[in-house]
Amino acid sequence: MIKRNILLNPGPSTTTDSVKMAQVIPDICPREEEFVELMKKMRKDLLKIVHADEKEFTSVLFCGSGTINIDACINSLLPENKKILVINNGAYSARAVEVCQYYGLDFIDLKFKEDEMVDLEKVEKTLKENPDIALVHTTHNETGTGLLNPIREIGALVHKYGAVFTVDTTSTLAMRPIDIKADNIDFCMASAQKGLMSMTGLSFVIGNKKIIEESKNYPKRSYYCNLFLQYDCFEKTGEMHFTPPVQTVYATAQALKEYFEEGETAKWERHLRVYREIRKNALELGFKEVIKEENQAGLVETLIYPDDSNWDFKKIHDYCYERGFTIYPGKISDANTFRLCSLGAIDQDDIKEFFKVFREALDFYGVNIPIIYNN
Ligand SMILES: *Cc1c(COP(=O)(O)O)cnc(C)c1O
């Protein structure tokens, strides 16, 4: 029926046919009760994914890609005359820093190398020396490299110094298990097309109700993506402030059903099985990885380009793409890398098939196996 492509890029991910087909529905105005009920259930289901208690937490949906969540959290949750600390060891935290710059916020960019773990002592020192920090932001799985940050430990420090902790969980939520309370998270976020294996255009923030309500009186820095405004609209009417991505909402309702059918543990084990298959095959070919094994999130494998004059990423990409497999460039400033990810409705056998094609591509273009590096 629908051609099945294996997406090894870091989202959007491969979806099931049932999720694709769930978008095909009779036309409906999203202000109808039927649609309002659909979103109401969705907001509750999203809480369950991160084991959030309905009394304390809420979820707020936005029409947009995942970056809208970063934007909304940062522009909405910083009180007047306070500072935001971004713990930054990769492309997605760097994006959060840019959001701070665009809004003219008072921020500290606490930078670490992209292949290095966050130094908790430096985090604590920064919090101690800057008592005006009210908000701390970081990324769970740095999708640019696949590095997993110690959010539970960071969160404990953030709370020790009385600040609010927002975590970009876009590339872990609904894959790697998250427990919002135990992980010391006040706000986490994702888009429908990554862990949930749904379509693009719907994103959501899951966070502490009381903090959102307090933010009502914070400076309003955006009209379209203010967190309190969107929350308040949902609470009062059950609707998104402005037009929602209707068909993606239907697809996501189906994706949530399939998420709970597969189950948190089984789904995470599947992603991990896929990841291990990717890693095993890549290392067997002789590729070098960027992130040390103990720091890998198990979802994004970043590999260094060979020092081989026959290696041309675009050609290898095109060869695989024509055969239904999508590979993706890296996002790290000082090395040429590419990424193979374990998101989506795929399993170990898909990876075995991929590596047959990938190896064929290397042979076809005369790239040496094992992979050559000069140092
Ligand atoms: C995908 C992703 C986002 C959102 O990126 P968009 O380009 O807006 O879809 C944000 N943070 C992380 C960690 C991501 O992996």
Image: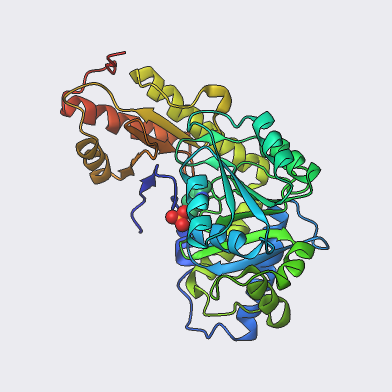
User: What colour scheme does the image use?
Assistant: rainbow
Q: Is residue 156 visible?
A: yes
Please state if 319 lies on the left or on the right of 225 as rendered. left
Return the residue found at the far top.
375
Who is closer to the viewer here, 159 or 230? 159
**Image x and y of residue 167, in percent:** 63, 49
**Image x and y of residue 24, in percent:** 45, 72
Instruction: Name the quarter where the N terminus is drawn.
Output: bottom left
Please state if 241 lies on the left or on the right of 8 as rendered. right
- Picture quadrant of residue 139: top right
Give the answer, above or below, for where 80 lies relative to 144.
below
Residue at image x 55%, y 71%? Answer: 222
Residue at image x 55%, y 57%? Answer: 70
Please state if 116 lies on the left or on the right of 229 as rendered. left
Residue at image x 60%, y 32%? Answer: 118
Instruction: Name the quarter where the C terminus is drawn.
Output: top left
Who is closer to the viewer here, 310 or 34? 310
**Image x and y of residue 358, in percent:** 29, 31
Q: Is residue 193 visible?
A: no
**Image x and y of residue 61, in percent:** 60, 67
Residue at image x 43%, y 26%? Answer: 290
Please give the count of numbered marks on the rendered protein.
0
